[in-house]
Image (cartoon, rainbow, N blue to C red):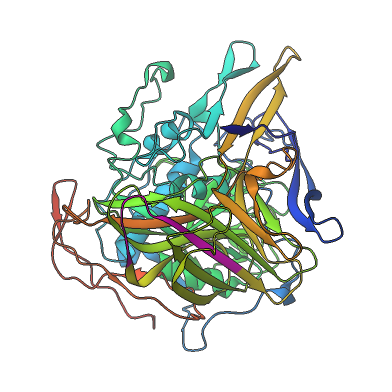
Amino acid sequence: MKQHFRIVLIFILFVMILIGFQTVSAEIIYEEQSGKLKHQSQDIEVFSELSDYTDSFYTGYAADPFSMQDYTPKDIKDIADQDFSLPSSFDARKMGWITPVKNQFPFGTCWGHTAMNLAESNLIRKGYSNSRLNLSELQLHYFLWHKVPDPLNLISEDKNLWFPYEYAKGKRYYWIDSGLTAHRGLFLLSTWIGPTFESAAPYPSPSANIHQIRLDDSLAYQKTVAYLDNAIVVPFQNINAVKKNVILYGSAMIAYHNSFNPNYYRKEKASFFCPDKKYPSHFASIIGWDDTYPAGRFSQVPPGDGAWLIKNSFGTDFGNDGFFWLSYYDESLYKDAFFYGFEPKKKNQRNYQYDGSLNHDTISFPDSNEVLAANVFTSQNDESLTAAAFATNSHDFKYEIRVFTNLKDDANPESGELEMTIRGRKNYSGYYTIPFPYSISLQKGTRFSVVIRITTEQVGRANIFTDTSFINKVKNYRGEKVTYLQFISSSHPKESFYYSKENGWIDCYDENEEYNLGNVRIKAFTMIKAGNTKSLLSDTMESNQDLLIFDQTELPTSTSKSADPILFDQMDVSKLMLPSTGF
């Protein structure tokens, strides 16, 4: 077994009170001249933030090095369908999609609260539950840093480690205050760690002793009730696309510069506008908008009317019962909105994966408009292969998925029997699960591969995510350098591959350690043939999963049309009737 310990190539900011870090984004690219991969640093940004108001507090946001900000507006196609009528105002609460506001205080769990709001609203939007659904934020943050072997034991050697350190005398940042980037968060959810019900892992009280919190290992995977089906990253350059996807998904994850400074936050109007280019420090959720929201209702007058309706995680005493208005013109708003799609998890579903480290890079070819990568797996049971997933930072791309079984050469993912080819198109970067039009039967011990090709119109834009190792140190209040964050990607031979025209298939394990490719973020999903295949959320639900070949829209990949009642955490609820899209 080989463990890649990465020389620091990406410095990640955790925007914390009185602490600043520098972050450098590095991308793995292919150098045609030498036929080898190399690192190229780019998108260098300095994130150094001091709390500008005494009642601001650390919320748990961490800056993400991957963004669409290097693309000009002409690179982003307007994908809002011509027949999709967008209203001038929208409020997902009126649709019954939004659950009650929660309070993260005093812990830095804004990502977990926002992610669980996205999960709750999406499951309700699809008709799987109602607004009484309550998913656990603690479970996500706990198992983010407390590793438990996955059911197939494929990512058990990958580690995500947090080491508490003193940022001031007698004051420490613990795992619950660690923060998370939006990409790392979606990669965590893609491993099928969570979500689970709040009743299984209740959020700690403000006076809780963090050292004494212990969750049963079964809560990591066995109690997962839904899984991340897809996640898309939509640039705010296309405001109509953001609005459209709020309606399609239920809500969106955003990041902005949180502050209670009256120059930015107008308490009596529950409105926020930051005209300064400050870096984001907090995650929250878009649940609606109003194009006519008056500019005069903000502390400082923005260039025009219009605001996003935001659900926060500061309790109902904040804002208007926990909600507030964020100006369209806010200068601190992060460039992209994140949307998560979820599906109920069935009892015998399996996730074949190698990417357990949450740190990430991409593989791309600067002189090519495509990238080809693959993962090779060995089936652990007699089972049916039903879907595959991949993660990419490309936008407006075509994808091709090929599945091979009974591989003759473990060093060649294409050396087996071609079982299926699927082609499609997506508008946004993100994480996609593609359901197969028919299942592929696998006998126990079958070596099979999932081969992904990403193609873009622009040269150098095609890429696929990998997991990587990363160690970061910070100076404590004494000025001593201490390790506080560590991601370890443990890879093995014959797992992950990428293809070059000069050298054919190259095993990522064989690359020079300084490149630290880790494993490719490609997954395969199966169902055990024998036993109960009912959803963990429902004893009666039937799921309709339709494959869209060359789909041009960003609709969620599956919907449920069952009218049967669904059992949520021992509650019998009925599915909501969803409105037509013409509001």
Quick check: 183 above or below 155? below
Magenta segment main secondary structure: strand
Residue 161 colored in magenta in the image = no
**In the visual, does 202 lie left or right of 398?**
left
Quarter containing the N terminus: top right
- Return the x and y of residue 400 as percentages of the image width and height: 54, 72
- Return the x and y of residue 169 as percentages of the image width and height: 64, 11
- Return the x and y of residue 81 as percentages of the image width and height: 51, 84
Give the residue drawn at x 46%, y 55%.
523
- Return the x and y of residue 289 as percentages of the image width and height: 50, 67
Quick check: 98 above or below 260? below
Q: Is residue 238 visible?
A: yes
Quick check: 468 above or below 477? below
Residue 328 or residue 183, whichever sits in front: 183
Residue 327 or residue 217, whichever sits in front: 217
Residue range corresponding to the magenta coloring? 440-453
Give the residue drawn at x 39%, y 33%.
149
Q: Is residue 97 visible?
A: no
Image quadrant of residue 75? bottom right
Quarter containing the C terminus: bottom left
**In the visual, does 240 lie left or right of 12?**
left
